[in-house]
Image: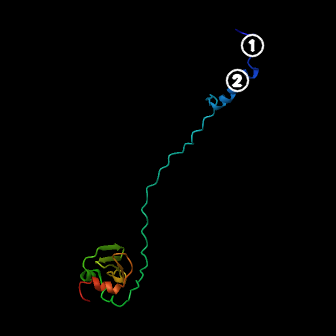
Amino acid sequence: MMTGIVHRKAPGLRLGPALLLPLLAACVAVPSAESPRPAPPPSRPATRVPPARPAPPRPNPVFQTPKIMRAPGLEGVIEQNAAALVRRFGQPRLDVREGDVRKLQFTGAPCVLDVFLYPLRPGAEPVATYVDARRASDGLDVDRATYVAALSRVTP
């Protein structure tokens, strides 16, 4: 049974959805026929890249006379050429050349011996001017003369 009560909706509730429409419309982007388009990048005339020119030759460096290591026990190595060092120590593990400089590396169980060869005058054959020795196990520096003797195959 119905009683005489009539339910009415509050007047503000009918406007609620209508008020949300403009807010929702702001979230949607609609393309416009009048929207400006980005301008295309300016066209550049085609340019031709000139052919590469080879680098000019380097001027000949001024020759520098190397300093020669002088230490007891190295007399049979210092100022010897590569052939004499190979006769003394055998074939090098490394033979590195850079310009007129040469590095020979000889190895044995106890150590690694690096011998640096430089020409003593322009155009001359490089000879040993510096020797460096280190333990093969950990790379620590060791007495050069001791290891020159240890690696030598011939008696000086």
Instruction: Where is residue 67? Give x, y as percent.
Output: 41, 85
Type of residue at label 1? Val
Residue furthest to the top? 1
Circle on res. 57? none
- Marks 2 and 1 close (CB-CB < 8 Å): no
Q: Quadrant of the C terminus?
A: bottom left
Residue neighbourhood size for the residue with mark 2, other residues' Cα within 10 Å, grouped as few (<14), some (14–19), many (≥20): few
Can residue 78 be seen in the rendering of this structure? no
Instruction: Where is residue 135? Give x, y as percent.
Output: 35, 78
Mark 2 vs mark 1, foreground winner is 1
Q: List the residue tagged with mark 1.
A: 6
Q: Is residue 15 left or right of residue 136?
A: right
Seen from the viewer's position, the closer of residues 3 and 37 is 3
Instruction: Give the quadrant of residue 4.
Output: top right
Q: Residue at x 43, y 76 (%)?
A: 61
Q: Residue at x 66, y 31 (%)?
A: 26
Residue furthest to the bottom? 72
Q: List the residue tagged with mark 2.
A: 18
Q: Could you tell me which secondary element the residue under label 1 belongs to? A: loop
| Vertical placement of residue 29 versus 2, above or below | below
Residue furthest to the front? 1
Between the C-alphas of marks 2 and 1, the distance is 25 Å
Instruction: Where is residue 134? Give x, y as percent.
Output: 36, 79
Type of residue at label 2? Ala
Q: Could you tell me which secondary element the residue under label 2 belongs to? A: helix
Q: Residue at x 68, y 30 (%)?
A: 23
Q: Earlier in the sequence, mark 2 or mark 1?
A: 1
